Image (cartoon, rainbow, N blue to C red):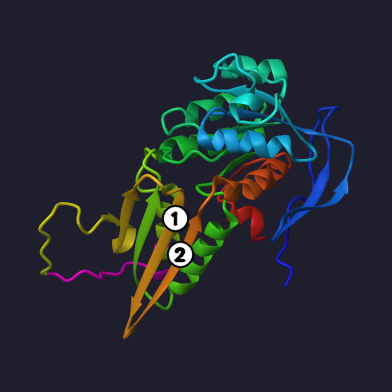
Amino acid sequence: MNYVFQAVRSLDIQDEHAIIIESKFGKSGKIPERRVDVIIRVAVCGAAGRMGSEVVRAIAREDGLELVGAVDRHGLGSDAGVVAGISPLGVVVSDDLRGTLTGTAPDVMVDFTSPTAVAGNARTAIGAGVRPVIGTTGMEAEDLAELGRLSAKTGVGVVVAPNFAVGAVLMMRFAEMAAKFFPAAEIIELHHDGKVDAPSGTALKTGEKISKARGEYRQTAVDSVTKLDGVRGGCFNGGIRIHSVRLPGLVAHQEVIFGGLGQTLSLRHDSISRESFMPGVLLAIRQVVGLKEMIVGLENLIFE
């Protein structure tokens, strides 16, 4: 069976160096469908981090994309390719985001930084007419709403996704479907011990979808007794329990367990490598240049 989805329908880039590309992604990755001699110029914020370095490597090997800027507090003055463990790319890591955006004129800025920095980075990008693709989680709801207003006002497209792995997006969709038949559900999310926010953005997004599908549901006994604070996890909207695990050796994992009369249903997704996020990141880079507003969730680019 050929599992593919349309990556790009149209791009609207004014830069004379920009390129229009249509492609499809399947089991084995990218399958180019049509090329026109152009390039989408990309800056990566958080370029020296684990996810940022993975994005740098992905852009370097992708037709139609060019890394033109790299921003991070670490690796200053070094070549972004060398920092990412590949050949030099001729792009020096800087800690000046505004200067990098002004000096390199990217079409898109990919942000994998921190919950405290991401909103400011995105505002700076929108102010410079650069379209943000945001993978950093933990952003405050007020900041997200502000970015949505800025995007609508300026016509600068924004993509925000709690998870860029296509499998994780499918898991959330399946959980939303199952919630109509199995209202009792709990979420267990597991990540590497360097992840600073908990619960994960994916767990919160999953909880939102389940809550919307099933409504309010009380699944804990009225007279239940807990002997350790927090042992039952955090209580999300509608009574959904979310449990966060942080351990070395993990990357990104989530399991949703549904309970019903005499049966359970488990949905699980495992990202065993950060490469799993790259097809989704590349899709968002290509799609955002054709947007005039903010899109939240990779599913809104895949399921149309």
Question: From which residue to which does the magenta span run?
Answer: 211-222
- Could you tell me what secondary structure mostly forms the magenta stretch? loop
Asked if residue 121 lies left or right of residue 217, the reply is right
Q: Secondary structure at mark 1?
A: strand
Asked if residue 53 lies left or right of residue 11, the reply is left
Q: Secondary structure at mark 2?
A: strand
Residue at image x 49%, y 38%?
A: 136
The quadrant in which residue 11 appears is top right
The quadrant in which residue 286 appears is top right
Residue 15 on image: x %, y %: 81, 28
Q: Earlier in the sequence, mark 2 or mark 1?
A: 1
Q: Residues within 10 Å of mark 2 (few under 14, many from 20)?
A: some
Residue at image x 40%, y 38%?
A: 140
Check residue 221 for magenta coloring.
yes
Q: Which mark is residue 253?
A: 1
In terms of depth relative to the viewer, which is nearer, 271 or 239?
A: 271
Residue at image x 10%, y 58%?
A: 227
Q: CA distance from mark 2 to mark 1?
A: 7 Å
Q: Amino acid at mark 1?
A: His
Asked if residue 290 lies left or right of residue 177, the reply is right
